[in-house]
Image (spheres, coloured by chain):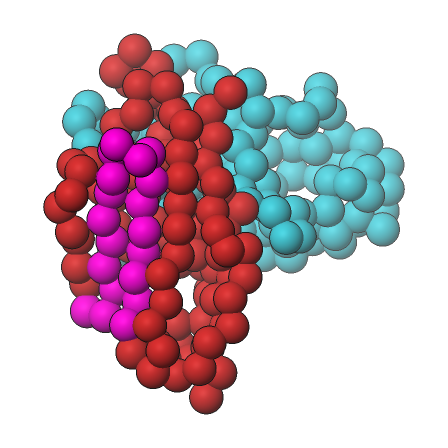
Amino acid sequence: EDKVVQSPLSLVVHEGDTVTLNCSYEVTNFRSLLWYKQEKKAPTFLFMLTSSGIEKKSGRLSSILDKKELSSILNITATQTGDSAIYLCASPMNYGGSQGNLIFGKGTKLSVKP
Amino acid sequence: GAGVSQSPSNKVTEKGKDVELRCDPISGHTALYWYRQSLGQGLEFLIYFQGNSAPDKSGLPSDRFSAERTGGSVSTLTIQRTQQEDSAVYLCASSPGRGGLSYNEQFFGPGTRLTVL
């Protein structure tokens, strides 16, 4: 059964800390891995990773995929209280080349204290 | 431009009643997905529409759940005879649906928080 597993489930840090969130996957015919940030209700897209070893970066956030280890990490440097959210990792089901729904991990709840 | 919209934003109902949740996808997006997020859980896939193809209903938890998509645009998720365990946030997402990697990026609506008393 395809699955996505995230760790830790929750994390509390102080402003200025650097955090690393982990995601591992077992997905048949894997094609891509996505990271989302969920603050209230709607998850907002952060990154899509398809190639191993190529870092994607957006401001203080960065992410990289390791296809050998079937995993990805999301790094946040110099954390701010506004980074407090649930971070979701997901991978699309793949039906013979036609992508389907996303399989999500349970998320990592990050709390950044002032 | 307008994103995915959902209504109502909150719905409180009594056990045994039917509810309808609505999703308006981004204009031009051919793929539409429904997910459910229960407290402390990740998003759970419910149903997926792609163009005029038959929907993928493999995630629907019981036959009390159904969804339709009229005219390839607006979708309605119906839950009949609601139970307390149906309480969750129901999220709708849409994506362009074209081939290639752009297909993977799903844009989410704000969700409907359903509470079954």
Q: Residue at x 65, y 32 (%)?
A: B78
Left or right of residue B117, residue A109 in this image: left
Chain in red colour = A
**Would you say residue A100 sits in the magenta stretch?**
no
- Residue A59 appears at what percent x and percent y? 19, 69
Q: Which residue is drawn at 63% across and 53% down?
A: B40
Instruction: Tell me which segment is drawn in magenta.
Output: A59-77
Left or right of residue B29, residue B87 in this image: right
Q: Residue at x 45, y 36 (%)?
A: A4
Front residue (pair A41, A78)? A78
Front residue (pair A76, B110)? A76
- Residue A111 appears at what percent x and percent y? 50, 72
Q: Residue at x 23, y 49 (%)?
A: A64
**Would you say residue A61 sits in the magenta stretch?**
yes
Please, what is the dominant secondary structure of the magenta stretch?
A: strand
Q: Chain B in the picture: what colour?
A: cyan
Whether B1 is drawn above or below B76: the answer is below
- Residue B15 appears at what percent x and percent y? 86, 42
Front residue (pair A83, A101)? A83
